[in-house]
Image (cartoon, rainbow, N blue to C red):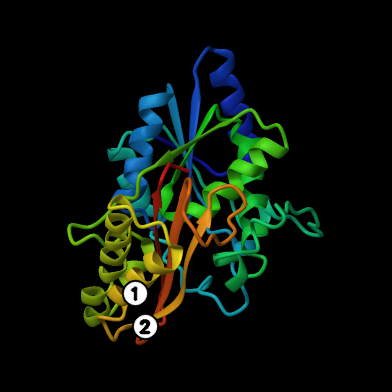
């Protein structure tokens, strides 16, 4: 495995690979790798000849009161994990290379970036789409693999790809979960033991809603109430939102008649860690 830090070198390397007939897949990450990231890498390797995993903690997607400075950065350990998982190239640019002095160009996918997490984190998705488009332009992958855990991010990026006529296929991987159902996340390391024990109630609530839908319940209120009831069984979480939205405009629905996203975000009371999870009913992302 080779570590590449220069955007120009990465761009030239990808062009050389593709001119030689090799296809390239990209797995964008912010590092602090876990089994969920490695499952994305496995999908990338299954679809293309060469895999590139980017490791870049993107400053422009963090708000002023968010955890940019304390976000874990175990770069050497990440590289070891990526290499063992079959990664061909790690692209790890610096912030100065990605956002040089007097940088002023940003990408904003309107409307669908303003609901759910976008409502609580203004500017977040502008930062995400900007860095992802830059990564697409540098690596020029045929396939980019993202996890369903960040469902709104997936839908926003898909819309950007469609609207800007980008030549990349977005592959969406299922959420990788711990044995008790908690969605695997780099932020799980922040949880206290009490919070870690209570956190799986988010997934239990989502499954309860899914079971109700499968049994014929289509009322969004009834389904979201099932999620809330489960989360309230633990005292360690504060609900930020439980929303049921369509998978096109990401707007709330009252009755689930087609593909819908049940999304939940909570904040832990002791460590102040933000956790998200979701499930798709009646279709897929």
Q: Is residue 19 above or below residue 187?
A: above
Give the crowd class for mark 1: few <14, some 14-19, many >=20 residues within 10 Å: some
- At mark 1, the secondary structure is helix
Q: Is residue 215 above or below residue 22?
A: below
Label 1: which residue? 190
Q: Residue at x 25, y 68 (%)?
A: 200
Left or right? Give the position of 151 relative to 236: right
Q: Residue furthest left?
A: 179
Foreground pick, 67 / 236: 236
Label 2: which residue? 271
Asked which quadrant contains residue 173, the reply is top left
Q: Quadrant of the N terminus?
A: top left
Q: Are marks 1 and 2 in contact (CB under 8 Å)?
A: yes
Q: Position of residue 284 (x, y in %)?
A: 44, 42
State which tag comes first along the sequence, 1 or 2.
1
Q: Is residue 180 above or below residue 269?
A: above
Foreground pick, 44 / 200: 200
């Amino acid at each position: 495995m080779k570590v590449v830090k220069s955007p120009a070198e990465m761009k030239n390397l990808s062009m050389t690979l593709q001119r030689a007939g090799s296809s390239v897949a990209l797995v964008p990450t912010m590092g602090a790798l876990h089994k969920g990231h490695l499952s994305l890498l496995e999908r990338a390797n299954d679809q293309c000849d060469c895999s590139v995993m980017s490791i870049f903690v993107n400053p422009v997607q963090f708000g002023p009161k968010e955890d940019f400075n304390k976000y874990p950065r175990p770069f050497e350990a990440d590289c070891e994990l990526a290499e063992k998982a079959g990664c061909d190239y790690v692209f790890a640019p610096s912030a100065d290379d990605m956002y040089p002095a007097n940088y002023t160009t940003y990408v904003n996918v309107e409307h669908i970036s303003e609901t759910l997490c976008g409502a609580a984190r203004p500017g977040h998705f502008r930062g995400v789409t900007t860095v992802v488009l830059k990564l697409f332009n540098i690596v020029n992958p045929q396939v980019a693999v993202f996890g369903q855990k960040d469902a709104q991010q997936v839908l926003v990026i898909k819309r950007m790809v469609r609207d800007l006529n980008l030549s990349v296929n977005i592959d969406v991987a299922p959420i990788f979960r711990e044995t008790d159902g908690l969605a695997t996340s780099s932020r799980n390391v922040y949880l206290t033991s009490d919070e870690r024990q209570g956190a799986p109630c988010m997934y239990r609530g989502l499954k309860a809603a899914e079971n109700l839908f499968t049994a014929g319940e289509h009322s969004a209120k009834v389904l979201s109430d099932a999620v809330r009831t489960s989360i309230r069984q633990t005292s360690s979480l504060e609900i930020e939102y439980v929303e049921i939205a369509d998978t096109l405009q990401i707007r709330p629905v009252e009755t689930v008649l087609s593909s819908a996203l049940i999304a939940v975000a909570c904040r832990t009371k002791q460590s102040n860690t933000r956790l998200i999870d979701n499930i798709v009913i009646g279709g897929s992302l």
